[in-house]
Amino acid sequence: MFGKPVQFIGDINNDTYEDFAVGSMGYDLDMGVNGIAIDAGRIQIYSGQNGALIRAHTQLYVNTASASAFFGSAFSGIGDVNGDGYGDYVITDPRFSTGEGGAIANERGRIFAFSGANGGVLWTYKGTEDYQFMGGNSSIMSARDFNSDGKRDVAVGIPGSHPNGEWRAGAIMILDAVTGVEITRFNGTKSDDYVGRSFDTGFDINGDGVEDFILGYYLNSDVAFFAGAVKVISGQDLANPAVIYTQPGPGTVNAFFGVFVQLLGDTNNDGRSDFAVSSIETVATLDWAGSLRIFSGLDNSLIRQFSGTEKDELFSWSLADAGDMNNDGPGYKEVISAGLMASNGAGRADAFDVKTGAKWDKIPGGASGENVGSDIDAGKDVNKDGIPDLILGSIGGQFGSIFPGRARVVKGDPTHVPAGASIEVHPEIGKTGTSLVFPTVTTSGNITLTYLNQTATGANFRAKQANKLEYWIITTNAAFSGNTTVCVKYNQAAQGYDETKIDLQHLEGTFTAKTTTRDAANDVVCGTVTSL
């Protein structure tokens, strides 16, 4: 299960680039004479500069087989907590059941803080309740500075906690990022609230200058059986917080509204942070299609709703704040939503423009069972081009395929255009002289531009430099006859391309070079095909 979770994790190796981590919850740990720990878990941290492996972590302090511990179910960058100039990070071990010396602690879980400089353990926190599943389901993150020591602290979900005897009411706990000592917590109040399984923080919803929290109660049945619900609570006093907003589920059974939640910042330019809520509800007659709703932090009103288009798609199974990927101005953002079971389990990630409601890009999966979108993260500029990028996990294998799993860091681009857009697109807004131009085609057609190789209908072109993986793909579904010339204009200086090696290629079973002219002085390469 390599590819879940995936996350940008900060600058771990102090090279000024945002690094990223990939989990393998199903990793089997070989402990020699002590046997094999099935699903013990592992995470690997990679350089954002060049993709090189920085280090890997597996389950620690194991002296007997500890199956299904799922070490690495959640991890997060926490900034430089020890003052050495390197970004540090935390990793959860939610189902760990065997303590040092063989003492049994049933699925209490542990949390480790690691040094970014050398991977050493800075502190460890051990769970105190059996079956609390502390830090499962990607539920750990950096939080505001609760104890005023100048360092951001750590928020961790404990969905299996049973405060006041309420079974699985759940909790969110705040740990001192420097010492690992508990500062405060928020407790669920009813059995099966499962607080902490789905939550987020990092933005101020009510405008009081303090970062707030959003909580998903996806098993709530107040409206209908497992319809779900969401609460936004104040971050001022987490132990006794004021409720800012409540959103009930959609009123249908098994909607699981709140299965994933996220605070987004300002998406509609009204000066207030907004929030997103996922569900896996039935859409029309499509069971488990799923929906994503964006709500206003100003008045709790619905801003946008996006829904799946396939039965069992699990649309919005994972979601991410993408930042302003399409350069439509301060105060606007995009969101990434993934349906890991789309297209017979191949999966797909979609980018949505909250401002216009347009779906302006999609990154499809490959083979059936790849499960693209098993996890996603976005909003960090890995390649320093001024545009937020994203990372996609594809666990594969979980639903019967033999796909080994993968993670892809994908270049964010402001110019992926939806169907029906004009024939000219611009792959690098803000960099002078860059555009893809179709000079002999005068009719507006169904044109899209994507950064990754993918299966698509219609005529496909790509501009690719030899010996490099990255390229633009230009797809048109419009029907044109006769010779059609396609030209790519690029920015050689800004992009560092070797223009003598850039070829325009056309998909004819395989991509075939169609370069007919090169204009190095104007950074243009053109190719001609007989028909589209």
Image: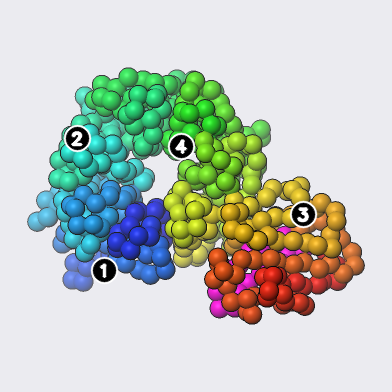
Disc nearer the start of the sequence (4/2): 2
Q: CA distance from mark 2 to mark 3?
A: 54 Å
What residue is shown with label 1?
30
Tell me, yes or no, whether the two marked residues, 4 and 2, touch with CB atoms within 8 Å: no
Q: Is residue 260 left or right of residue 471?
A: left
> What secondary structure is found at the residue carrying circle 2?
loop
What residue is shown with label 3?
423
Q: Which label was assigned to residue 264?
A: 4
Q: CA distance from mark 4 to mark 2?
A: 25 Å
Identify the magenta region.
458-475
Give the answer, above or below, for where 278 lies relative to 68.
above
Q: Is residue 20 left or right of residue 87?
A: right
What is the residue that sits farthest to the right in this orientation? 482
Disc nearer the start of the sequence (1/3): 1
Residue mark closest to the camera, 1 vs 3: 3
Tell me, yes or no, whether the two marked residues, 3 and 4, touch with CB atoms within 8 Å: no
> What secondary structure is found at the residue carrying circle 4?
strand
